[in-house]
Image: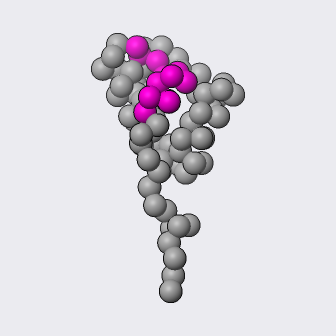
């Protein structure tokens, strides 16, 4: 549940695809992205997450997860 006044419809294909593209499918990264987008939506008064807002917050880079560690 996001504290926004307008529904963001995150399950719409264009929104879900944008979220997946930025987060790389990592749930932790998706959470960071959604928090950044929700914060931006509140600060700007937009009160809704849309594709443009996701793309604006694409700077939220994925973390380096266990899958990327190289064991020597």
Colour scheme of this structure image?
A: one colour
- Viewer-nearest residue: 47 or 60: 60
> What are the residue bounds of the magenta stretch?
46-57
16 w.r.t. 3: above or below? below
The extreme right residue here reads 13
Instruction: Name the residue: 49% across, 62% down.
Output: 65
Residue 11 place in picture, x, y as percent: 64, 28
Instruction: Name the residue: 33% across, 16% down.
Output: 44
6 w.r.t. 64: above or below? above
The extreme left residue here reads 43
Instruction: Name the residue: 40% across, 27% down.
Output: 38
Say whether residue 10 is left or right of residue 46: right
Q: Quadrant of residue 33?
A: top left
Residue 59 place in picture, x, y as percent: 42, 40
Q: Is residue 8 magenta?
A: no
- Viewer-nearest residue: 1 or 21: 21
Say whether residue 40 is left or right of residue 64: left
Question: Could you tell me how many numbered marks the image carries?
Answer: 0
38 w.r.t. 27: above or below? above
Residue 35 place in picture, x, y as percent: 40, 35
Residue 3 place in picture, x, y as percent: 39, 24
Instruction: Name the residue: 43% across, 33% down.
Output: 57
């Amino acid at each position: 549940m996001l504290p926004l006044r307008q529904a963001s419809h995150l399950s719409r294909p264009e929104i879900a695809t944008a979220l997946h593209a930025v987060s790389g499918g990592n749930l932790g990264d998706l959470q960071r992205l959604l928090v950044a987008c929700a914060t931006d939506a509140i600060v700007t008064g937009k009160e809704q997450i849309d594709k443009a807002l996701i793309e604006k917050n694409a700077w939220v880079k994925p973390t380096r997860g266990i899958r990327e560690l190289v064991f020597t």
